[in-house]
Structures are given as structure tokens and as C-alpha cells.
Amino acid sequence: MQVKINNSILELVQGDITKQGTEAIVNAANSGLRGGGGVDGAIHRAGGPQIMEECWKIGGCPTGSAVITTGGRLQARYVIHTVGPVYHGGNRGEAELLAGAYRSSLKLASEKGIRTIAFPSLSTGAYGYPLDEAARIAIKTVVDYLKDHPEIGLVRFVLFNADAYGTFETTLRDTQSPLIPL
């Protein structure tokens, strides 16, 4: 599914984040940038040791923030590592931290002149964020950013399974933003 937001495209696909041909992909990292399971592990395995070496030099990344490395052996030129929150019931600032992770990643892409970027669904795996709530935050944050940042030409959400894709698709269709389906 694709929608147009001003001159930008927001796209949903089901697939593997490590196989995206966007200029940058986003890694659902931990704050120590130490690698891990899920998306993080898949990106490090596919991208090779160069990404981890760069992460060690950076040292860490606070929750809600983002840092950038090269893409190693990935097709994407860059990996933007962002840290989403662990979900603790929703009363500990998780929503703002999750929005911050998306916003920080987009801001870093804008600063680096990156025009195409692919995101996984942040914090919805091991960090336990409810998928429907996370999808609303992700879509709203990205749509709001694209309205004021035409330098980003494409934001793609790469959803790992049909359930995640369906949730993001429903959220995108239900959004109150004036979006134009392509």
C-alpha cells in the first residue's frame, strides 16, 4: 500500500528489512548498540562485522534517539540505529519515546541527505509494545514529519508478517490525515 503526503510517498510492504534497496534502513537497536535478536540481529548478520565495529566506536544511544553507521554488506548504504522503549503499560512516557525514535531517525536522514528510508515496526517485538498502539504512533509521527520535510522522498514500513502489515494498513487507512492513495 502507498499513499502520497505532499511530494513524499509512505509505503507499507511485508518483507525483510535487510533486503531493502532504500538508501537507509532503520535498526531497532538496544541502547548499548551491542546487537541482539530480532531485527537487530538480522541486520548485523546480513551487514557483517563492519556495522558492529562502528557501533562500538559510537558507544551507545539513549532511548528515543538515533545514530548512523554505514550499511556494511547490506544493499542500503546506511543503517540508522534507534532505540524504542520497552513497554511497561504505557504510563512511563513510552508513547513519546517511541515517537522520538521515529522522529530522530527521520531527522538524522534529513541531515545526511538521505531521501529513502525503510523502518521496521519499532518496539513491537521483544520490547512488548502493543502493535495497534505502536502502529498509530509510527504512522502519525511519520506523516507529521513528511508534511514539513519534502527532502524525504520515500518512507517504507517493512512489516515482518501479515498481522503487522494488516495492523499498519488499517491504521494508515483510518488516519484522519488528508492522504492520497496511489
Image (cartoon, rainbow, N blue to C red):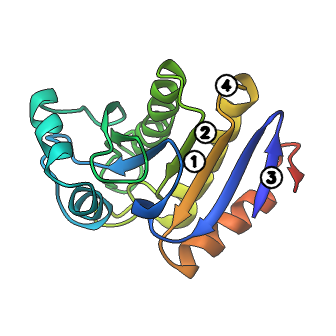
Badge 3: how crowded within 10 Å, few (<14), some, or many (20+)? some
Mark 4 vs mark 1, CA separation in Å: 22 Å
In the rendered structure, which disc, 2 or 3, sits on the residue that comes first in sequence? Answer: 3
Mark 4 vs mark 3, CA separation in Å: 17 Å
Mark 4 vs mark 2, CA separation in Å: 16 Å
Residue 65 image position (x, y, % from top left): 35, 31
In the rendered structure, which disc, 4 or 1, sits on the residue that comes first in sequence? Answer: 1
Task: Give the SS element for disc 1.
Answer: helix
Question: Of tags 2 and 3, which is closer to the observer?
Answer: 3
Could you say which disc has been placed on residue 121 in the image?
A: none
Three-letter code for the amino acid on which mark 4 is drawn: Glu
Three-letter code for the amino acid on which mark 2 is drawn: Thr
Three-letter code for the amino acid on which mark 1 is drawn: Ile
In the rendered structure, which disc, 3 or 1, sits on the residue that comes first in sequence? Answer: 3
Residue 175 visible in image:
no
Residue receiving disc 1: 137
Badge 1: how crowded within 10 Å, few (<14), some, or many (20+)? some
Q: Is residue 181 left or right of residue 85?
A: right
In the rendered structure, which disc, 4 or 3, sits on the residue that comes first in sequence? Answer: 3
Could you say which disc has been placed on residue 3 in the image?
A: 3
Is 118 located above or below residue 13 in the figure? above
Residue 87 image position (x, y, % from top left): 34, 55
Do the numbered discs 4 and 3 sit on residues whose CB atoms are within 8 Å?
Answer: no
Task: Give the SS element for disc 4.
Answer: loop
Mark 2 vs mark 1, CA separation in Å: 6 Å
Residue receiving disc 2: 141
